[in-house]
């Protein structure tokens, strides 16, 4: 299927790639790197058509993110993480959408979703407090989704716990400078966020349970299958696609480097069957990760298009596929990088940046396999729902 965003990415591919080192040095996307993402339209692919979005097939979005990440890991990561937020915002209160996109439909929305804040009920809404890490691309965003737990009148978390997503304008939160100093994805500017005693109108608070079980898009009256993917398929989509694209970038950079490389033994890489075998095997593993990821998205889209609701077991299996795809791609990348020699890891060689970015991306909470694999096995053994916090990730 045609993907016009991919065409626009290709037109800007050389410049996107050239800014990778600048993004890393700055500790966030440069203004030009962010502008290039705006020009491609990738952030608006899942945005409602009413506000200039494409309401695109989610697989098209994943392909665009992979391609951008192949060029520069940080740009791809921001495209993937920030680009998912319009998908959820389409389910929010119409007045909130108008406040965000009414005057400028190019407005970006940040996150994180980790429920690290507390909302305390008051007349008309809530008082909100908390601190969060890992707000990717946040310097270029004017609104934010933040995860929260419901508190009582004293601000203490109520039991049993209830989780929400809270929508705030830039004026209601603080970005903590110098809070993003990490080994990889340095150019994403994934800084800490602080909220102190912000008033949040009730209509800007979304029940996480309704997102998880598919109630939210139905109540919002959304008809496009794009918005009826399970949340735990849609949200990881941008992040895992970025990781796969980063691994493709490592492979591409390695192949360009190996073309003229002569090993210390005097053997050209082109004449070394062992290196060639390892590279080919790794390339197939990365391709398998891409295929599995896209197939997973297509399967749930087709199901949503038919009006069939995903079961808990299907959601769990989807998460297993997504987590496995990320791990498979990064392991394959390691095989490629290990055959690049010492010069392949010099700081002026992009191989090492893709390598660091890929491992940083794999460390994201959605890529932790233990609880996901455990929960998936339990659901396949008819133990549903799985006990404890495992359910939160599927």
Image (cartoon, rainbow, N blue to C red):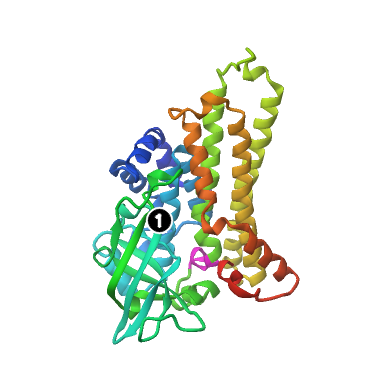
Measured as percent of width and height from the top left, residue 310 is found at 62, 70
Q: What residue sits right under mark 1 in the picture?
A: 82
Q: Residue at x 76, y 71 (%)?
A: 381
Q: Is residue 389 left or right of residue 24?
A: right
Q: Is residue 188 visible?
A: yes
Q: Is residue 142 visible?
A: no
In which quadrant of the rendered image does the C terminus lie? bottom right
State which quadrant residue 116 falls in.
Answer: bottom left
Q: Is residue 370 left or right of residue 210?
A: right
Sort mark 1 into few (<14), some (14-19) or many (20+) by Cα contacts within 10 Å. many
In the image, residue 313 sits, relative to residue 32, either above or below, namely below
Give whichever of 125, 203 is nearer the camera: 125
In the image, residue 350 sits, relative to residue 3, either above or below, namely above
Q: Is residue 227 magenta?
A: yes
Q: Residue at x 49, y 84 (%)?
A: 159
Measured as percent of width and height from the top left, residue 296 is found at 62, 57
Q: Residue furthest right?
A: 381
Q: Which residues are magenta?
A: 224-231
């Amino acid at each position: 299927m045609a993907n016009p965003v991919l065409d626009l990415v290709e037109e800007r591919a050389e410049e996107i790639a050239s800014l990778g080192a600048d993004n890393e040095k700055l500790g966030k996307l440069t203004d030009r790197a962010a502008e290039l993402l705006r020009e491609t339209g990738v952030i608006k692919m899942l945005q409602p058509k009413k506000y200039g979005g494409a309401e695109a097939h989610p697989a098209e979005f994943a392909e665009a993110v992979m391609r951008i990440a192949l060029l520069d890991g940080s740009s791809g990561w921001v495209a993937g993480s920030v680009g998912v937020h319009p998908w959820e915002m389409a389910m929010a209160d119409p007045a909130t959408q108008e406040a965000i996109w009414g005057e400028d439909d190019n407005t970006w929305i940040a996150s994180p979703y980790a429920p690290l804040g507390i909302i305390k009920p008051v007349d008309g809404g809530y008082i909100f407090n908390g601190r969060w890490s890992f707000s990717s691309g946040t310097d270029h965003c004017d609104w934010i989704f933040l995860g929260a737990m419901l508190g009582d009148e004293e601000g203490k978390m109520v039991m049993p716990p209830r989780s929400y997503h809270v929508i705030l304008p830039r004026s209601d939160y603080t970005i903590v400078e110098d809070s993003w100093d990490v080994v990889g994805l340095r150019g994403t500017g994934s800084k800490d966020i602080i909220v102190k005693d912000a008033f949040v109108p009730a209509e800007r608070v979304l029940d996480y349970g309704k997102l998880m079980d598919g109630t939210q898009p139905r109540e919002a009256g959304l008809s496009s299958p794009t918005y009826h993917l399970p949340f735990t398929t849609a949200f990881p989509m941008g992040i895992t696609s970025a990781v796969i694209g980063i691994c493709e970038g490592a492979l591409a950079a390695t192949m360009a480097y190996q073309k003229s490389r002569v090993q210390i033994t005097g053997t050209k890489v082109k004449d070394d069957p062992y290196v060639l075998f390892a590279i080919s095997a790794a390339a197939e593993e990365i391709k398998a990760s891409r295929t599995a990821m896209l197939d997973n998205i297509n399967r749930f889209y087709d199901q949503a298009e038919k009006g069939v609701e995903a079961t808990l077991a299907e959601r769990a299996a989807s998460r297993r596929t997504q987590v496995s795809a990320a791990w498979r791609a990064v392991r394959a990348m390691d095989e490629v990088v290990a055959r690049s020699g010492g010069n392949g890891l010099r700081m002026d060689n992009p191989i090492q940046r893709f390598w660091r970015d890929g491992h940083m991306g794999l460390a994201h909470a959605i890529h932790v396999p233990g609880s996901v694999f455990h929960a998936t096995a339990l659901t396949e053994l008819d133990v549903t729902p799985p006990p404890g916090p495992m359910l939160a990730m599927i």
